[in-house]
Image (tube, coloured by chain):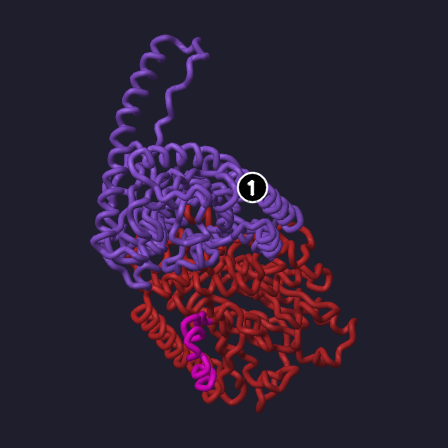
Chain colours: A red, B purple
Amino acid sequence: MDLDSLLFVTSGWLEGTGKESDVVVSSRIRLARNLAQFPFLTKADDPTRKEIEGLLRDAVSKVRKENKKAKKAAAETEGDQGSRIASESDQPPAKPHYSYSDLTYIDVDTLSKIDRQFLMERQLISRELSESSGPRGVVVGNSQQTSVMINEEDHLRMQVLRSGFNLDACWEEMDQLDDAIEARVAYAYHEQFGYLTACPTNVGTGIRVSVMVHLPALVQTKEIQKVFQAMQKMGLAVRGLYGEGSQAMGDFYQISNQITLGKSEPEIIELIKDVVPNVIDYERRIRKALITENHQQLHDQISRAYGILRSAQTISSEETLHLLSSLRMGVNLGLIETPDLSLANELFIQTQPAHLQKRYAKELSSAERNTARAGYLRERLEASEEE
Amino acid sequence: MDLDSLLFVTSGWLEGTGKESDVVVSSRIRLARNLAQFPFLTKADDPTRKEIEGLLRDAVSKVRKENKKAKKAAAETEGDQGSRIASESDQPPAKPHYSYSDLTYIDVDTLSKIDRQFLMERQLISRELSESSGPRGVVVGNSQQTSVMINEEDHLRMQVLRSGFNLDACWEEMDQLDDAIEARVAYAYHEQFGYLTACPTNVGTGIRVSVMVHLPALVQTKEIQKVFQAMQKMGLAVRGLYGEGSQAMGDFYQISNQITLGKSEPEIIELIKDVVPNVIDYERRIRKALITENHQQLHDQISRAYGILRSAQTISSEETLHLLSSLRMGVNLGLIETPDLSLANELFIQTQPAHLQKRYAKELSSAERNTARAGYLRERLEASEEE
């Protein structure tokens, strides 16, 4: 798998499948880790960074090879089981094939600006990794549900994504990946504080559990402010599409834990698992109220959004996100026939600047992107009508 | 022909055919006449009005019968010619069948408000005839290109309409219709002043020659003000879609003469025929400039107008006119594939309040009309895509 081919592969976490996918786009868990024998990156010069990168790249590569072997073995076992018929249900199931069994290393330092932005739009790297300099990279799983950033704020930032509300699956894979890497390197760990990180806000578990929710009805009715306040009281953060400091675009929000210390990983996951269903319910209730009290206005808003996306000759990123948000809600409320949820999700990512520039294989001015974006939207929506 | 069936018949003058039809929707000539033996309507009580109505209704009915005979005779002559082969081109052509050979009398006093408004939207009666009271009516030709109002401001207001820039055809028919009626009744005529009318502004010829033009590019670039000024200097009036006092809707304007005295009918027609081509050229030049200098923005505006009209679930009359105006320009500039000009023209009329209410055969509130209008637009535009 090379970076360019990613453009034509829908990220697994965007599929619109999984639990509560009308509101929850994706679930994500990330761990921050540092190597014991190296200083934090703020104190590391380029040769040291280079050494860290090489070491971690090698460790992850070994994990990958080992996983490939395990996968092969599992496939053989599966084959055996298949021939033995399914009655032997006491037989433990074959070990699941984690997405990190096909990991590709991408040297971020040598990438063009567009490629770095592209990986960021795909949620595979952070803005920090994209915009900093020096030896750094990311290891990406085939289905784009696993990414391991090397030399971001910490030496290691591992992330697992899943479509829908599915933190357990994220944690299961993340836990294994963490163990597999830890078996090869020595993490900076303190008996009392736990895992040590560059920024004190990550010390302890180094975990950030986040759920990306789509809250168009709460935004439209301005009820979203109440959600923000409630989340804050519970020590949770609400951020925009691209994490810290980013604006909420297209009515997408990331709900995540702020505290990493003093609680175990499962406890933090449980907190998010407890709180998010309330937000889901809230958004659904408001959607229902909107559809009951003003069905026609909502239907009109969504139909017009579709009409414009389907016909515009030039369209900005901001307007696109705004209209796609209406469209996505319409799809979930059954107010519109096409596209399906998976395409609605995908259009959010595919219409972003770097995605468009990769598609046209050249740098595009803002005006050119607006034309390319409109053309892409017309093409995809027309095709989905014909399906 | 009854009034209800009119709904499903496109007015001949809306066909989008005829000369310069990218800018000129229709040409119109009307004559104001009064009967010599009756006072003007301002001085006439209801019994007198009733008498006038009866007399004129009868006179028009005789014109109709005579014309039917002439039409039949012409058809027979035509048949003969057909069998004699076409070589005899020196043979004069059969007399044209004027649309007033099939005239229907409509008693406006007994009509519902919706029906009166409907006739007004079709340009068959004036706001004055629609909103006044007492015995009054209109005689309508089958193709809706002829209408004779009885007891409007004057006893008789005859109008002939044609699609495109075609004043000669209007005048030819109008002249004959006027002669045919004058052969049966005595018009109020003064040797020095000419035809006498209720309002002095119509005295003399009693003629109003008007051309309905669509000037979206001049409006968009605000050049329209210059047109207004130039017209005024030449003694011409520029009015909105429904004549005197009405606002310009959908960028439609009526250019007409203000002076009816001291010039012959052909002279007044010539004046309009001389001036309108300049307005046509001006509008076309600006359209060309818009398409050259900002092709994409124009294309986008027109495509979005289509997208919204094609998908909205509720839409006001005002927004519809605004969007249809863009659409009509797009059709003329070849920037959009469907609809054709005839449908674009028709949608302007069919989406108006009384038309919608007649279609649904009931009174509709403003909100209900907006829904009905959106539904009608979606249906017609979808059908035109499938053609």
Query: Does residue A76 appear in the picture of this structure?
Result: no
Residue situated in front as seen by the camera: B314 or A210: B314
Residue in view at x 44 percent, y 48 percent:
B203
Q: Main secondary structure of the magenta part?
A: helix
B180 sits left or right of A240 in the view: left
Tell me residue A304's x, y (percent): 43, 58
Magenta stretch: includes residue A221 = yes
Tell me residue B320's x, y (percent): 43, 55
A263 sits left or right of B47 in the view: right
Magenta stretch: includes residue B365 = no
Residue situated in front as seen by the camera: B325 or A246: B325
Residue in view at x 73 percent, y 60 percent:
A110
Tell me residue A60's x, y (percent): 61, 65
Tell me residue B339's x, y (percent): 44, 42
**Amino acid tagged 1:** Leu
Residue situated in front as seen by the camera: A371 or B237: B237
Residue in view at x 33 percent, y 43 percent:
B148
Query: Does residue B371 appear in the picture of this structure?
Result: yes
Q: Is residue A206 above or below residue A130?
A: below
Neighbourhood count class around disc 1 (C-alpha, 10 Å): few under 14, some 14–19, many 20 upward: some
Q: Chain of mark 1?
A: B
Q: Quadrant of the C terminus of chain B?
A: top left
Residue situated in front as seen by the camera: A310 or A264: A310
Residue B187 found in image quarter: top left
Residue named by callout 1: B271
Q: Quadrant of the N terminus of chain B?
A: top left
Q: Is residue B240 above or below residue B88?
A: below
| Residue range corresponding to the magenta coloring | A213-231
- Label 1 element class: helix
